[in-house]
Image (cartoon, rainbow, N blue to C red):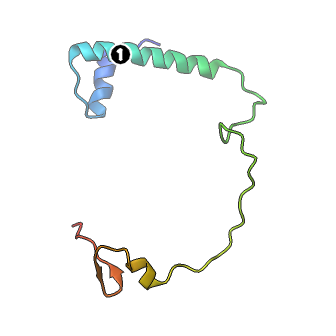
């Protein structure tokens, strides 16, 4: 599916991207090839094909979620660079 340079420039404008005329020409060709590949993929018959949930087979059963107590506050704060009133003090963000 050919994509014109004008369409590529309009898409780039919508994304607030600026390209030179040479770059737009290259990008329009690349977009055309991408759309051709997508057309080829959607033309495949996938009826009866199970969707993938992961690329690698996983035979490890999920572990049981067992609630455990957290660390005591004084142990957590021992490695903090700065503390105040029992909390980790950090620089202001705003």
The x, y position of residue 7, in whole percent, is 33, 20
Write the residue at 72% across / 66% down. Answer: 64
Write the residue at 66% across / 40% down. Answer: 54
Q: Residue furthest bottom?
A: 85
- Residue 88 appears in which quarter of the rendering? bottom left
The x, y position of residue 55, in whole percent, is 65, 36
User: Could you tell me which quadrant the C terminus lies in?
Assistant: bottom left
Left or right, 55 with reference to 75? right
- Could you tell me which secondary element the residue under label 1 belongs to? helix
- Residue 15 appears in which quarter of the rendering? top left
Write the residue at 62% across / 77% down. Answer: 68
Closer to the camera in the image, 88 or 94: 88
The x, y position of residue 35, in whole percent, is 48, 19
Other residues around mark 1 within 10 Å, as few (<14) / some (14–19) / many (≥20): some
Q: Is residue 41 above or below residue 51?
A: above
Which residue is the site of mark 1? 28
Left or right, 3 with reference to 40? left
Closer to the camera in the image, 91 or 74: 74
Q: Residue furthest right?
A: 48
Q: Is residue 42 above or below residue 65?
A: above
Q: Is residue 20 above or below residue 47?
A: above
Closer to the camera in the image, 64 or 20: 64
In the rendered picture of this protein, how many numbered marks are placed on residues? 1
């Amino acid at each position: 599916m050919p994509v014109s340079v004008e369409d590529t420039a309009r898409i780039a404008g919508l994304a607030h991207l600026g390209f030179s005329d040479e770059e737009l020409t290259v990008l329009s060709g690349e977009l055309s090839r991408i759309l051709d590949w997508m057309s080829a993929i959607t033309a495949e018959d996938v009826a009866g094909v199970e969707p993938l949930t992961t690329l690698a087979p996983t035979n490890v059963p999920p572990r049981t979620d067992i609630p455990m107590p957290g660390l005591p506050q004084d142990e957590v704060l021992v490695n903090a660079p700065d503390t105040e009133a029992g909390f980790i003090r950090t620089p202001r963000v705003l």
